[in-house]
Image (cartoon, rainbow, N blue to C red):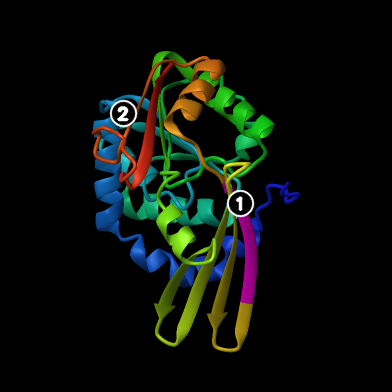
Amino acid sequence: MNSRKPHVDWDILFGDDYDFFDLPDLTPELSEREAASMVKLGGFEPGMTLLDAPCGHGRHANVLAAQGYSVVGVDRDERFLAMAAAEAGQRGVDVDYRQLDLREMDFDAEFDAAVSWYSSFGYFDDETDRDILRRYRRALRPGGRFLLDMHSPYRHIPSILANHEMHVDVLRRGGNMAIDIQELDAEASRYYAEKITIRGSKVERARYSVRMFTAPEILEWFRTAGFSGTRVMNEHGGTFTVSSRRLVVLGIA
């Protein structure tokens, strides 16, 4: 049995190397498209109070605020929140940004909708993640909607089988490189990964792990957390299949 425990090197994984390697691909155009997907898949309407958790550096929260949503964005990372607030100021929009760990959310029927986007769920042990899901549920008013976006569990399996039980992503920025090495623990249904970044003579290593879910399993988690009318879909709102790139879940409070 795999003895590894869920772990994330948060400060390294989302530090300066994240800005250098990842941010260039997170363009304003992509954020606009993803926010539009949230609205479509979640059935959100302008004027709703919306919780974006975790909100990261605000790339979706600021777009949604500009579209007429009343947005609260929470994240554990003070640096990301400062980036989010600065962009909100540039856009001339008002977002209530708060430094808060998902495990400490204590909202009580305050929102019409909540969203967790960009594979931001499943980083802790199962007991903790189930508790976080219940916290999303408690944050919603009756009839409120929670939209969860995550990787499909089938996404990397062909690569893993072809590459000695590892999936490897390589990203180059000029002469610099970020290498993401993922191993799937099938028994725990969890990826254990190491991200190695090389910038000039500087080498950083960050470990992280992410829980993966089949459709029946995540539907059971939502049900036991108190959601009803839950459905799964692909990233376009269609039927979730083994070839889907994303697994999106919509739960009704």
Q: Is residue 230 left or right of residue 29?
A: right
Could you tell me if the residues under marks 1 and 2 are in contact, i.e. CB atoms within 8 Å? no
Location of mark 2 (residue)? 42
Where is residue 68? Give x, y as percent.
27, 33
Quarter holding the C terminus is top left
Q: Is residue 201 left or right of residue 137?
A: right
Instruction: Give the quadrant of residue 233.
Output: top left
Q: Main secondary structure of the magenta part?
A: strand
In the image, residue 15 sits, relative to residue 89, either above or below, namely below
In the image, residue 237 sits, relative to residue 185, either above or below, namely above
Disc 2 packing (10 Å; few <14; some 14–19; many ≥20): many
Q: Which of the two residues, 18 or 228, is positioned nearer the viewer here?
A: 228
The boundaries of the magenta stretch are 204-210
Residue in view at x 42 percent, y 73 percent: 171
Residue in view at x 25 percent, y 34 percent: 237
- Point out which mark residue 209 bears: 1
Residue in view at x 58 percent, y 22 percent: 134
- Point out which mark residue 226 bears: none
Q: Is residue 227 left or right of residue 208?
A: left
Q: Amino acid at mark 1?
A: Ser
Mark positioned earlier in the residue sequence (1 or 2) = 2
Where is residue 75? Give x, y as percent.
55, 44
For this orientation, the residue located farthest to the top is 142
Disc 1 packing (10 Å; few <14; some 14–19; many ≥20): many
